[in-house]
Image (spheres, rainbow, N blue to C red):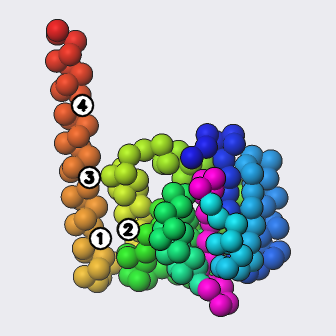
Amino acid sequence: MSDDSNATVLLVDDEEALVSMYEAYLADRYEVRTATSGAEALSIADDTVDVALLDRRMPEMRGEEVLRELRAAEIGCRVAMLTAVQPTVDIVDMPFDDYRVKPVNEAELVGVVEVLIERAAYGERSQEFFALASKKAALEVAGETSSDAYETLCTELDEVRVELDRQLDAVGAEAAFSDLA
């Protein structure tokens, strides 16, 4: 992964005008690659991509399929679903890092890219925590909170939070004792 000033963002949406607008929002900050289909996105995605922004509704290859292919290819980029599709519990099993419902403005788009670049520096469990928290927030905004999948998501989020808290407590205790030596 790159630092923020050299980060590469892959924009994938079948609406060319939207891709052009998002590219204009990001081009002065990041290297931007664009694709208007899932197949095109996969052909230009590689380990130099730091963040991928994927539309869910595209003809031929949907955003979820692109996401799964990126993960299967072990391309380690952070992924945000950037879509007009309101989230339902079907997102719980999708391996993305953030979920935003269109339309998004320039500040929101830049913000999500910045956050995902920052998260890339975190450990795997911290990244998992933020991905779960994003899914929970997206479902809450959509009013999709009365399902077993949502409850399972909340439980998993709490378990990861407890584990991270324990790790932070242990690091804090070790640091405190190392000062005494």
Q: CA distance from mark 4 to mark 3?
A: 15 Å
* Residue 136 disc label: 2
Q: Amino acid at mark 3?
A: Arg
User: Magenta segment: does it hold 130?
Assistant: no
Residue 59 place in picture, x, y as percent: 67, 90
Q: CA distance from mark 3 to mark 2?
A: 13 Å
Q: Which residue in the protein does label 4 denote?
A: 171
The answer to whether mark 1 and mark 2 are in CB contact below 8 A is yes
Residue 100 located left or right of residue 59: left
Depth check, front residue: 173 or 121: 121
Residue 70 located left or right of residue 165: right
Q: Is residue 112 visible?
A: no
Q: Residue 32 sits in which quadrant? A: bottom right
Magenta stretch: give its range.
47-61
Q: Which residue in the protein does label 1 denote?
A: 153
- Crowd class of label 3 (few under 14; some 14 to 19; many from 20; radius 10 Å): some
